[in-house]
Image (cartoon, rainbow, N blue to C red):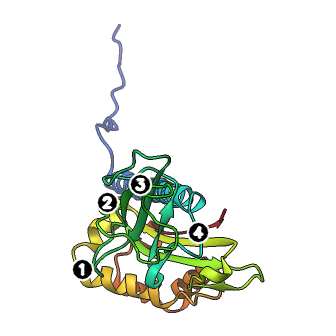
Amino acid sequence: MSHCIDTPLHRKPDRGGFTLIELLVATAVLALISVVLAQMLSATSQTWITGQAKVNNFTKGRAMMDLLTRDLQGGVYRRDLPAFPNQTVAFFTERPGFGGNASLTRNLSWVQYDLGPSTNTVLQRADLAQAWNATGTPAFGESNAPTGAVARDTAPGIVGFQIQFVYADGSMSTTYVATNRPKAVSVGIAVVDDKTLELLALNSEDIAALRKGFSSHASGTNSVKSDWEKYLRSDLDWSAYPKSLASGLKIFERYVSLP
């Protein structure tokens, strides 16, 4: 008795890999995922950079405002003592200074703030210690500003610095009138973060133009911040500066009551 075994004449071959179409589809999907991940990484990186710039600006802006506030609120504003000579930011303040003879009665110093040359971005604070008593300096009735104050650097990245006086009738002016002592001072500073400052420093003309723009667009009769924000919106040629300036520039303003 014989057994017959049926053997198929054509056996379907086993699949050992992907087809060309499957490979193309997988490649396209992988490329799409890569693009999406790259965009997410770029957006996250930009958000982090912007956040760092804001933190950097806030730190410098707050430090400078606090320093100016302490000096201004401790100021000695009398008709018979110099203050803001030739409209420079300089005055006597009840804070110890460097040098001079400050061992008598009460410590006092002559301080002044200056941004220096047009390409400088470091606001300098100079001080000179004084002795305040009946026979020492400053002598009551003295109208000449002291000389010899020692300048020190403060925070870098200051591209705008403006002070305005607020008088009893509510008017504002950049002019200090000793016979009509102002009730408050408006302090405005424009700050760029350290990374943007590095890019600006590659071309000193950019810094000079930016400083000139802030200086010339402070009307002296309105809020410093309002004037500067209008300048940034309407008159600044953003294309001439690094792209990071848009997120790396911050304006601060504070009103300080005078004693």
- Give the side of residue 44 with respect to residue 117, left or right: right
| Residue farthest toward the front in the current orientation of the protein | 135
Residue 222's place in the image compared with 197, above or below, is below
> Does the image show residue 52?
yes
* Earlier-in-chain disc, 2 versus 4: 4
Residue 197 percent across, percent down from the top left: 32, 67
Mark 1 lies on residue: 204
| Residue nearer the viewer, 206 or 28 | 206
Residue 166 percent across, percent down from the top left: 67, 78
At label 2, which amino acid type do we have?
Answer: Asp
Mark 2 lies on residue: 153
Mark 1 Cα shell of 10 Å, populated few (<14), some (14-19), many (≥20): few
| Residue nearer the viewer, 178 or 112 | 178
* Element type where label 4 sits in the image: loop
* Element type where label 2 sits in the image: strand
Q: Which mark is residue 20?
A: none
At label 4, which amino acid type do we have?
Answer: Tyr
- Give the side of residue 86 with respect to residue 165, left or right: left
At label 1, which amino acid type do we have?
Answer: Ser
Q: Quadrant of the N terminus?
A: top left
Mark 3 lies on residue: 45
* Earlier-in-chain disc, 4 versus 3: 3
Residue 47's place in the image compared with 255, above or below, is above
Residue 157 percent across, percent down from the top left: 37, 66
* Element type where label 3 sits in the image: helix
Residue 13 percent across, percent down from the top left: 30, 37
Give how far apart the Cα atoms at labels 4 and 3 are: 50 Å
* Earlier-in-chain disc, 2 versus 3: 3
